[in-house]
Amino acid sequence: MATTAEFEAAAQRAQQLPSKPSNMVLLQLYALYKQATEGDVSGERPGGFDFKAIAKYDAWSSLKGKSDEEARQEYVELVDSLFQGA
């Protein structure tokens, strides 16, 4: 499992990606980060035409029940893979 320090380092590295990942990968990064730092999604699903907020909520919600340790590990692995593929 990734340590908190490894997770924080990966979060810093994610800000410096050489190229912008696809929207799906960005949503995955967002969801894993939120799950690792805040746990399960809470609150109402956004409505109306705020499609970005809806997509972010749904991505985070899809990780419901995943432990913070698992989310940290997957986040670190995803960031590492993005740098390897660059």
Image: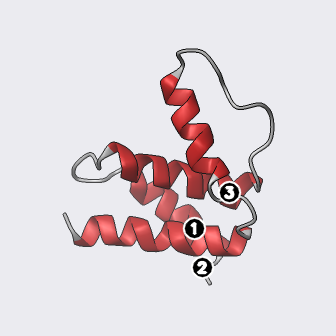
Q: Is residue 31 left or right of residue 79?
A: right
Which residue position is annotated with label 2? Answer: 2
Q: Amino acid at mark 2?
A: Ala
The quadrant of the picture occupied by the N terminus is: bottom right
Mark 2 or mark 1: name the one nearer the start of the chain: 2
User: Which residue is depicted at the point 37% across and 71% down?
Assistant: 80
Residue 77 picture quarter: bottom left
Q: Position of residue 79 (x, y in %)?
A: 40, 65
Which residue position is annotated with label 1? Answer: 7
- Helix, strand or loop under label 1: helix
Q: Position of residue 74 (x, y in %)?
A: 53, 72
Dot in front, 2 or 3: 3
Q: Are marks 2 and 1 in contact (CB under 8 Å)?
A: yes
Q: CA distance from mark 2 to mark 3?
A: 14 Å
Q: CA distance from mark 2 to mark 1?
A: 6 Å
Q: Are marks 2 and 3 in contact (CB under 8 Å)?
A: no
Q: CA distance from mark 1 to mark 3?
A: 12 Å
- Helix, strand or loop under label 2: loop
Residue pushed farthest top? 48
The disc label shown at residue 35, or none: 3
Residue pushed farthest bottom? 1
Q: Are marks 1 and 3 in contact (CB under 8 Å)?
A: no
The quadrant of the picture occupied by the C terminus is: bottom left
Q: Is residue 72 left or right of residue 76?
A: right
Q: Amino acid at mark 1?
A: Phe
Residue 44 or 72: which is nearer the viewer?
44
Q: Amino acid at mark 3?
A: Gln
Q: Position of residue 49 (x, y in %)?
A: 53, 15
